[in-house]
Image: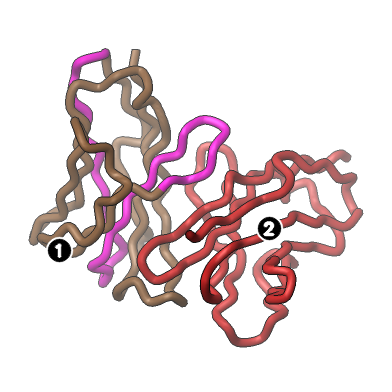
Amino acid sequence: NAGVMQNPRHLVRRRGQEARLRCSPMKGHSHVYWYRQLPEEGLKFMVYLQKENIIDESGMPKERFSAEFPKEGPSILRIQQVVRGDSAAYFCASSPVGTSVSNEQFFGPGTRLTVL
Amino acid sequence: AQSVTQLDSHVSVSEGTPVLLRCNYSSSYSPSLFWYVQHPNKGLQLLLKYTSAATLVKGINGFEAEFKKSETSFHLTKPSAHMSDAAEYFCAANTGNQFYFGTGTSLTVIP
């Protein structure tokens, strides 16, 4: 059973460009979470999605960031008009069921975004 | 409000000596607690989790953690450090809606 997959692993963008980060959850998992890790910091929750639904986006910046998890295909985190402050590692996690307190999340290897 | 505090940003130990990484949480109720390890340029790997069963939890690679409600702590320990333990360690709490992560503790193991 393959783990959570993220691509690309490394992404370089110039200021003003768009960044698209993809996440394929583990087989059988229908819940996806995105986190951002800034240098020297812990992971910060961004958004929680189920298939075709955004459940909790309280951690998403109000502008330029969006996420989707379509019925078919991977979850996408999209950052429009990137700025240098968007440079970070973006991690995706998945779980088989909802956010029960005891459920662990399985993490992907992350996408490291560098904005020049 | 929920928060997780890792008291040490860096810990250095000699190979073969005990490891102690500290974590405290604050919550209006007992969350589930987790320790994850992150090796350079890798994703997070679960070491162990506490979910209101036994308060002493054993994880992979010889790590264990004890949940102490009176101290709101969930410190991670290992009796004898190995060079391969050098990594970043994150404590996390799951309240059901979100995972809250501490800022991490970087463990250095000195040969």
Real-space Cα distance between discs 1 and 2? 34 Å
Q: Secondary structure at mark 2?
A: strand
Tell me, for residue A51, which label it has, or none.
Answer: 1
In the picture provided, is B103 more to the left or to the right than A63? right
In the picture provided, is B89 more to the left or to the right than B43? right
The colour scheme is by chain
Q: Which residues are magenta?
A: A15-44
Toward the viewer: B60 or B94? B94
Same-subunit check for callouts 1 and 2: no
In the image, residue A30 lies in the stretch drawn in magenta: yes
What residue is disc 2 on? B23
**Chain represented in brown:** A
In the image, residue A17 lies in the stretch drawn in magenta: yes
For the residues bearing labels 1 and 2, Cβ distance under 8 angstroms: no
Asked whether residue B2 is in view, the answer is yes
Residue drawn at 32 percent across, 49 percent down: A34
